[in-house]
Image (cartoon, rainbow, N blue to C red):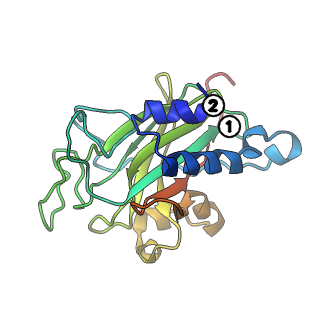
Amino acid sequence: MNSIDRLLHEAHLSKDGARRAFLKKAFAGSAALFTLSGAYAELLSRTPSQTEGPYYPDKFPLDTDNDLIVLNDRLTPGIGVVTYLSGRVTDLKGNPVKNATVEIWQCDAEGSYIHSNGSNPSTRKRDNNFQGFGRFLTSANGEYFFRTIKPVPYPGRTPHIHVIVKKGDQRLLTTQCYISGHELNRNDGVLRSISDPIVRELCMVDWLPIADSTAGEYSARFDIVVGQTPEA
C-alpha cells in the first residue's frame, strides 16, 4: 500500500477521484521538501510555540482518529467547509520526526469547543457531529494528515487550529496555525504575541480550494519544525 492509499485508509475516506487527485498533487509538490539536507536544511526555523489555551479536551470524544468530520459511526457529518490538513514534522536540520503524535483541536462551525466549558458564550450552540479533536502518528517521512473543517472565529479570536506534537511522553511543541490573510489576524492578541512578523508567518497557512472538488473542499499544508528531539 503506497503512502497515498495508506493515508486514505487511515482516515477512513472513500477513494474518489477528487481526493486522490488532491493528495497526489500535494505529495508530489512537496517531494523536494522531504529530502532537505545540507546547508539549506540548516536554515530551517523552528515553528513558534503558542499557548495551549483553556479548551484542550477535558473529556475526549468517542472517536479520536484523524477524520474530524465523521464522529464514530454517525451518519450525519460535522458542519463546515471540509479541509484536508497535512504537513510534515521535522527537526531543525530537516530530518523527519517519525512516529510522533500530532494532535489537533478546534472549535466547531458554531464556535464551540468540545471542552465542557467551551460553548460559544454568545450562542451556546454546539455541533454534536463534529469530532473537535484528532490524533495522527507521523509516517517514516514525518508526514501527518487530517480531514477537518476550515476554522471559524471564536469570540475574541481569529480562526485557528491548535496543534501539539508529542514523542512518547515528551511534548515537543504546542502551537496554533492560522488562515493566511484573514482580516481578524491583525487584532488577535495570541497571534500578535509573536512580535516578529517574519516568525509570525511560520504559523500562517494558505487554505486553497481543490480545483476538481464538487463539494467545495480545501487543502491546507502546515509544515512543523520542532527543536531537539528525544533521539537527538
In contact (CB < 8 Å): disc 2 and disc 1: yes
Q: Amino acid at mark 2?
A: Val
Q: Nearer the viewer, residue 177 or 206?
A: 206
Work out whether residue 226 can be spotted.
no
Query: Furthest residue to the left?
Result: 124
Work out whether residue 182 can be spotted.
yes
The image quarter containing residue 108 is bottom left
Image coordinates of residue 53 in percent, x first then y, are: 34, 50
From this view, report whether residue 136 is shown above or below residue 220. Answer: above
Q: Residues within 10 Å of mark 1 (few under 14, many from 20)?
A: many
From the viewer's perspective, is the residue at label 2 or at label 1 nearer? 2
Residue on which disc 2 sits: 97
Residue at the (52%, 55%) spot, across then down = 220
Image coordinates of residue 230 in percent, x first then y, are: 61, 24
Gap in angstroms between the C-alphas marked 2 and 1 = 7 Å
Image coordinates of residue 18 in percent, x first then y, are: 50, 52
- Locate residue 215 relative to residue 198 in the image: left or right: left
The image quarter containing residue 232 is top right
Of marks 2 and 1, which one's residue comes earlier in the chain? 1
Residue on which disc 1 sits: 91
